[in-house]
Amino acid sequence: MENMFLEFFSNTGYAMADYRHVIMIAIGIIFIYLGIAKHYEPLLLVPIGFGILIGNIPVFKGLGLGIYESNSVLHYLYFGVTAGIYPPLIFLGIGAMTDFSTMLARPLLMLLGAAAQMGIFLTFLGALALGFAPNEAASIGIIGGADGPTAIFLTAKLAPELIGPIAVAAYSYMALVPVIQPPIMRLLTTRKERLIRMEEPRLVGKREKMIFPIIGFLLCCFLAPAALPLLGMLFFGNLLKEAVVTERLAVAARNAIIDSVTILLGMTVGASTQADVFLTPQSVGIFVLGAVSFGVATASGLIFAKIINLFVKSKINPLLGAAGVSAVPDSARVVQMVGQEEDPTNFLLMQAMAPNVSGVIGSAIGAGILWSFMN
């Protein structure tokens, strides 16, 4: 009887677990706590956090349970990540939810979204300098775009072995936008600059909004054809929204489809962080470089807005530059929050959405450029 009990116990997770599993389970619980208690991107952090718990229950190899075993259910669900299927579907939903009218009303603000992508390329160079392979450096650099689906898509193509740490880093920094960005924004702007009021945007007509996804798609994808899977779905989703006659499809894209894919993406990405795969010095380096990338992207947008103000009569509130990172709509909300700390009657949210959504386009183009160069 005692031997049977000992044999049973040796087959349980309690016996097979080591300190690495405990660390990862603690990280998963922290993610869930931040999502539920602090409301930091709960739709992302809760699935990822619970996925981390799932991925760090010790199991026997060969039973078809682990996410890296080819015959397991989790492996089949994870195929949507490794094959780059989930990110374009999320972009479809984002397109169906996005209103590009503020960007069209003042196209100059699109440059702020482009400037924020400097974080991608500077971090790419930094990762190369630290000894990462070019394909790995490109995947790490894209964290600076603050766009989780784009980071996952590019990493799946260039460095699939790094999907776990890069995806967790990208979504972690997206969720921590309200914590990371404000100190950088206050450091790089003066109170006088933060008090600048933006002009009311012009009214954008329905026809203009309907034509934009077609023209935008052609211009962007001719520039960076490798971005076609992401930008094609983004602009297609936006066309469904603006065409009115396809409202039923737009509702499905921005509700059922994006919600279902977000659940699967978050849970499987979390489950991919098995302790023996995730807890490595390389993962620590990725998190450090990701933080640098995110900070550089925020600073680049702020500084470029200040440069633009040297040449225009109608000044831009430099805080808008921080919205150039494509954490939609959180970085735009942070701009509103920091602006209203100085003047509660200054409303910047609508104008901040212009660089915010252009940042989504910019990060996808950046990913396409890096992918084409690595190939």
Image (cartoon, rainbow, N blue to C red):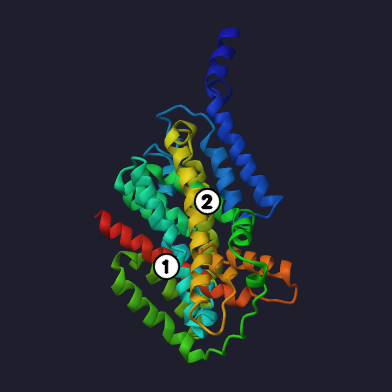
Q: Residues within 10 Å of mark 1 (few under 14, many from 20)?
A: many
Q: Can the viewer see residue 82? A: no
Is 317 rendered above or below residue 148? Answer: below
- Given the image, on which type of amino acid does mark 1 rest? Gly
Which residue is nearer to you in this view: 226 or 44? 226
Which residue is nearer to you in this view: 234 or 221? 221
Is 66 rendered above or below residue 196? Answer: above
Q: Position of residue 332 (x, y in %)?
A: 60, 68
Q: Residue furthest right?
A: 344
Residue underneath mark 1: 362
- Cα–Cα gap, marks 2 and 1: 23 Å
Q: Residue furthest top?
A: 2
Compared across the picture, whether 296 is left or right of 343 comes to left
Compared across the picture, whether 375 is left or right of 302 comes to left
Q: How many marks?
A: 2
Compared across the picture, whether 65 is left or right of 335 comes to left
Q: Position of residue 282 (x, y in %)?
A: 42, 37
